[in-house]
Structure formats: C-alpha cells, structure tokens
Image (cartoon, rainbow, N blue to C red):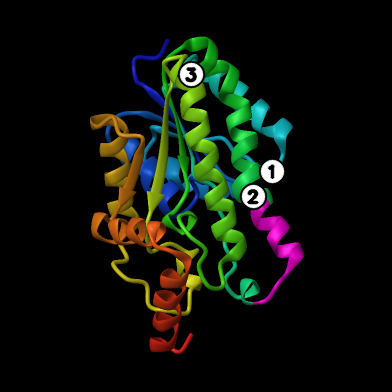
Amino acid sequence: MTEKKVIWITGASSGIGKSLAIKFANENWIVAASARRENLLQELNEINKNIHPFPLDVTDIEQCKMVFKDIIKEFKDVEISVFSTGIHDPKSEKEFNLEKIREIMEVNYFGTMNSINSVYDYFNNKKSGQISIVSSVAGYRGLPAAGAYCASKSALSSFTESLHFEMKKKNVRITLISPGFIKTPMTDQNDFPMPMIKSPEFAAEQIYIGLIKKNNFEIHFPKTFTFIMKLLKILPNYIYFKIVEKGMKKIDY
C-alpha cells in the first residue's frame, strides 16, 4: 500500500475541483483527478506530480466503475472521494428548456449518483473513509433563472443527508459541501452581481480544512453569505418571494 493517502476528485479540470486537486497534492496526498478533458488533467500533472489523470465522463455509469477500479489497482486504497462535477447554463434557464434541464440533471445529479455507485461497495466493505459531495447554497431554495441547477443541487443535498444515516453505521463519513459564489468558468456565465464571491483557492482551503481538520457534516462558505442563505431557507414563501423579487428589481434582472 502506498504511504501517501489517496483522494479521488471528479470535476478536477477546472473551478473548485481543480483548486482542490492542487491543494491536496501540495499537502502531499496522491490525487486521482477525473474530468472529461484529458488535456487539462495532464496540465495538472505538470503542476504537481502527485496529481494523476483518470479521464472520465460521469454520465457513463460503466466508465465510472472502470475508472475507480483502475484507481484502486494503481494505488490500492482510497481514503476520500470528492464528487464535484457540475454544469449550469443560466442563459438557457431563463426559459423552460426540457433538453437543457435533462442535461443538467444528468450531469449534476445522476453523474454524482454514478460516481457514488462506483465507490459504495468499496467504502461499505472498508468501513472507513469519506464520501464528499459538492452541492451548492443554490440547493437551499429556488432561485431565478436557475430552476434545473437549483433542483439538481437540492436533490444532491437531500440525498447526501439520507446517505449519512446509511453510511454512519459503516463508519464512513459523508460530507455535504455547499459553496456560495465562487469565481469559476461556470459562474463567469452569470450576468448579475454575485455577492461575497470568493476564489476557487479560498474554496479549496475551506474544503480541505473541513475534510481533514473538522468533523462537521456540512462544509459551507463563505460563512456570512451561507448563513444569510440558511435564514432565507426557513422563511415563509411569501416573505422569501418578496425579498428575491425586490432584489431582482434592484439589479434590473
């Protein structure tokens, strides 16, 4: 068995996943990095040789199984898996677009389910380790021009809570990661002001601390913004709608 601990990260070619891969590699972990764009994974390997590319399309359930088998074959053990693959198309979400809704759900929700499916028996039998799922504060409540994205993240959050009860009996830690606005190629598509937006490096640091140094179920950041979103989560609908609609008028959205 390798002396270094091993983490598997999906969605590792950009955004939070990329910064998280670099962070763990700099902390001397072996990082099995997965994403569709192999060339970007190779660039990560050039940044830090602790990062090993394992190209993957998470919508392919059989490929997910094979990639995880390859990771185990090469490194013998995986301590943490972080599933961070996600897409969003704010322009298409301003109107009802069933094709785009299906695509977002297929990647964000079912892609994560495919990833969990590939590691479930491994961690279940190992009776230790961590499965971490990247959701979003967008999963707390419905937001304008983000119906499919919010739905996919809400589904992930609920599933992760349910998975916690199941895997706790097996001594497997389940973690829900709920970022606020993080500057990534995905959020660069947004055409509205994003309050308290943070860098992907900030996100990676918060996730690393949450996974390695703390033991909370949910890792959420930045704290001021996420606490505001949690407050909005418990408000009655009529108050919540008024607040959001007022905000939309202010930015002419």
Residue type marked 3: Phe
Q: Magenta includes 96?
A: yes
Return the x and y of residue 215 as percentages of the image width and height. Answer: 28, 30
Q: Residue at x 60, y 34 (%)?
A: 115
Residue 75: give its label: 3
Foreground residue among 167 and 130: 167
Label 3 crowd bin: few (<14), some (14–19), many (20+), radius 10 Å: some
> SS class of the residue under badge 2?
helix
Q: Residue at x 48, y 45 (%)?
A: 12
The magenta segment: 95-105
Disc 1 versus disc 3: nearer the observer: 1
Question: Circles 1 and 3: CB distance less than 8 Å?
Answer: no
How much space separates mark 1 and mark 2, taking CA atoms?
6 Å
Residue type marked 1: Thr
Question: Circles 1 and 2: CB distance less than 8 Å?
Answer: yes
Disc on the earlier residue, 1 or 2: 1
Q: Residue at x 62, y 76 (%)?
A: 94
Q: Residue at x 59, y 17 (%)?
A: 121
Disc on the earlier residue, 2 or 3: 3
Disc on the earlier residue, 1 or 3: 1
Foreground residue among 185 and 39: 185
Residue 198: give its label: none
Residue 59: give its label: 1
Residue at image mark 2: 107
